[in-house]
Image (tube, rainbow, N blue to C red):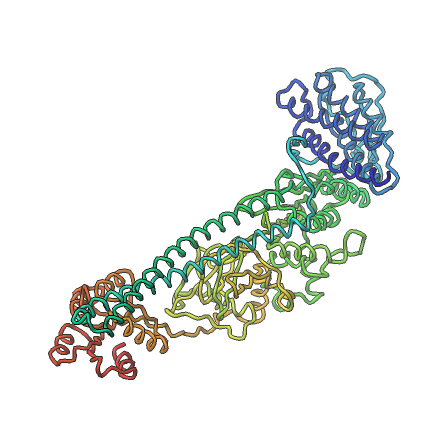
Amino acid sequence: MKDIKQKLLAAFDVEHREHLAQIRAFLAAVEPGTTGESNAVKVGIAEAFCSAHSLKGASRVVDLKSVMELAHRLETLFHQIQTGKLSVSKDLQLIVSRSLDLIEDIVTASRSNLEQPGSIDLLQALDQLVEGKLISSISPSGSVQPAPSSKIPPEAVNSPQLVIAGSETSRPAAPTLVVPASTRAPARTNSHSFDTMRLSAEHFDRLIKTAGEVISFSRNQEENAFHFKEMSQVVSNIEKEWGIIQKNSAKYLRQSTKDSDKSKLVKYLSFIETQVRALGRQLRAASADQKNDNFTLRRLGEQLQEEVQTARLMPAADIFESFSKMMRDLAKDEQKEIEFRMIGMDIEADRVVLQALKDPLMHTLRNALSHGIESASQRALLKKPISGRISLSLEAASRRLALIVADDGQGLNIDSIRSKALEAGLIDAQKIDEISDEELRQLVFHPGFSTAKQITEISGRGVGLSIVKDAIERLQGEVVVESTPGQGCRFKFSVPLSVSTHRLLLMQCQGQTLAIPTHAVQCVQRERSNELTSVEGRPVIKVKGIYIPVMALSRLLGMQDGSVKSNDNALAFAVIKFGEKRLALAVDGLLGEREGLIKDLGPPLSRSNRFAGGLLIDRAAIALVLNPPALFEAYHQLRHGQPLEIAQRKMEQQKLRILVVDDSFTTRILEKSILEAKGYHVDIAIDGVEALAFLSNHQVDLIISDVEMPRMDGLTLLQQLKADPRLSKTPVIIVSSRDRREDQERGLKLGAEAYLPKQEFNQKILLDTIRQVI
C-alpha cells in the first residue's frame, strides 16, 4: 500500500507542477486592475481556473487535504474574476503566489515524509479575497490581518491597498517577496491521445550517442566512395590501354590464324578483354550502389538523430522550477527582501544540458543573493527599491542557449578583487597596471577565490563559481561576467542546445589535426607574414577594422616545436572569441568544417582543461577538440610571462607538381613511381587532348611527354602549350622512342627544355634533367 501511495505522489508531483506553472503564467501576464471581461484575460483566467480545478481533483486522489482546500479556494477566486465579480489586484496576485509556493512546500514535505507546513493563514486570506475584503498586512509566512471594513467599495478594488511586510509602514524581521515567474507554461496535451512509455534517462542518453556515431560512421563512407572512384579510374585506364593493345596487335594476329600459339593468344586476349569489361561494369555498379547506400545511411542517421534529440527536449521550467522556493528560503535566511523572476522558462533544450546547468545556475543565484543584493537598510541609504531584483532569463538562437543571471545589487568590487588576487599570488604586482577590469572579473571563477569577509552556509569558500566555470566548459560553453559598481552584476552563459553533435573547425598544427567549436570562431583568414602589423611590439592582424593579437596555437598548447609552417609565406589564422575578447590562432592549415560527436578523453589528456574531448574523423584518426576559454587563459599567461612574438616559421619544401603524358600504361606507372619516390606530386594523362583538358583547370611545374600518342601527339601538344600565354613558360621534357637527330632538333626548336630518347632512358638521367630544368 505504501508503494502505491509513493507512486501516486510521484505522478502528482509531475502533474501539480504543470498546474502551478499555468497559474503563474496567468499572474505574470496580467496587470492589476484587469477583469475577466477583458479579452486579454479571458484565455489566461480560463486556463488558470481549469488548472485549479484539476489540481483540486488530483490532490484529493493522493489525500493531500490542505492542497485540495487551497486549490478549491483558488478555483473559486478565478471563477469570481471570470464572472466579473472580482478584478486582479496586487494583493490578489501576492496571496495567490504565496498559495502556489505553499502548495509546492506541502508536496515536497509529503514526498519526503516531513511535517507539512500550515495553511490556515493563506486559507483565511483567500476567503477574505473572495468576500471582497482588504488585506492590511502580510507576514513572510503568509499570515494576514483583515481590514476594519468588511467590504471593498467598487471604486477601491483596484487600489494598491496591500501593505507588504518589510515596507516603510510595516517591516518584520525577515521580509521576503518572490514575484511569480514571467513565463508561459507549456501547453498540456491529452494523455489519452497517444500511447506513452517510460524510458530510463541512461538508456536514452546511450541511444542519442549511438545516433551521433551513426552520423560519424556514415561520413566515413565518403572515403569508400573516393576509393571506388580511384578504382574506376584505374579500370578505365586499363580499358584504354587494352584498346591500344588490340589496335596495335590486330595486324600481327591476322597474319596467320592457323598458328596454334597465335590462336591461343587470341583466345587469352579475348578472355582478358571480357573480364576487364565485366570488372568495369561491376565496379561502376558497385560504386553507384555504394553512393546511394551512403546517402540513405546518412539521411536515416540524421533523421534518427533529429527524432531522438527532439524527444529529449524539455521545457527549462521542468528543471529550474525549484529555484523560486530556493530563493525564497535563502532570502528568508539572509533577511533580505527580493523580487525573483524567471523569464523564458518555456524554451525547450536538451534534458542533459538543462540538468548540467542546474547546479551552476544554483551557485550563481546564491552568490547574487549573498554577495550582490544589499540589506534593506543599505538599499534605503542608497535610495534603491527596498526589494532587490534578481532574474534568470533564457533565450535560444543559432543552436545555442543563452542564460543570464542578473541582479541590481552592489556589483563586483574591482578593488577588493585586485587586493585578494595580489594576496593569493594570482597576479604579479609589477604587472598590475596591465591587467584590465575584465580580466580581474574573470578571477572570481578561480578555485578558492572569494572576497567574502566571513564564511557562511551560502558563500565565502570560493568554490561555487569555480564549479560554475568547470561545468559550463564541460558543456562546450562559456561564461562571461559583467558588472557596474552600485548597479548590479550579470553572468552570461552560452551553451549548446544539445550535446549530441557539434559543428567544428578542423585545423592542422605540427602534424596533428585539431578541432575547435565553430560557435567560438569569428572568422578564418590568411595573411602574409611580412604584412602583419605590430602593436606595442606584438604582432596583430586587422579584422573589420579591429586589431587582434596573434599567437601560434602550438605555443598555446605547449608543443615542443612552437613554429608555424608556411609554404608560400602566408599564414592561416582562426580568429576565436570569448565574450568581448578576440585572439588570432596561427596554424599550419585550415582543413574545413565537420559535424560530429565529441567523445570524452581518457587520462592524461582528460586532466588538461585545454582539451574538451575527441572527434573521430576517420577509422583510425581522432582530432583533439580544443576548449576556447582555456586557450585565452593560456594566452594571458604567456603574454604576461614574456613578450608576445610569432614563433619562428619553418619553410616546408612544397611538392613540385609534374604532369606525365604518355599512352603507354607501363611507362606512365614507371615514371610516376620514380618521381613520387623523390617527393614530387605526379598527375598523368594518356595523350595531348587529355593533357590540355587537365591543364585548363590545374597548374603544374613541369610536363614530361611522349611523342607518339593517339588523338594528339607530343609535338602538337608542345606547339599548343607554347602558343598559350598561360602555359608557355611551363617547362617541357620530351621522352620518346624517336631517337633520330632531326626529331630531337624539332622538339627542342618547338620549345622543349630537354629531349630524352627512351632507348637511353634511366632513372638518374631523368632526375638529373628535372633538377636542371626546375
Image quarter of the N terminus: top right
In the image, 745 versus 724, the foreground residue is 745
**Residue 375 screen position, x and y as percent:** 77, 44
Image quarter of the C terminus: bottom left
In the image, 736 versus 508, the foreground residue is 736
**Residue 612 screen position, x and y as percent:** 60, 60
Q: Is residue 740 left or right of 326 when viewed as pictured?
A: left
Could you say which quadrant of the image residue 387 lies in?
A: top right
x 12%, y 81%: residue:
741
Work out which residue is located at the far right of the displayed protein and give it: 115
How many numbered marks, from 0 up? 0
Could you say which quadrant of the image residue 39 lies in?
A: top right
x 40%, y 74%: residue:
651
In the image, 758 versus 566, the foreground residue is 758
Residue 225 is at least partly visible in this image: yes
Against 617, is 364 above or below?
A: above
Against 24, is 644 above or below?
A: below
In the image, 662 versus 625, the foreground residue is 662
Q: Is residue 382 left or right of 434 when viewed as pictured?
A: right
**Residue 69 screen position, x and y as percent:** 83, 27
x 56%, y 71%: residue:
558
x 64%, y 65%: residue:
602
**Residue 412 screen position, x and y as percent:** 67, 52
Q: Is residue 668 left or right of 342 when viewed as pictured?
A: left
Residue 731 is at least partly visible in this image: no
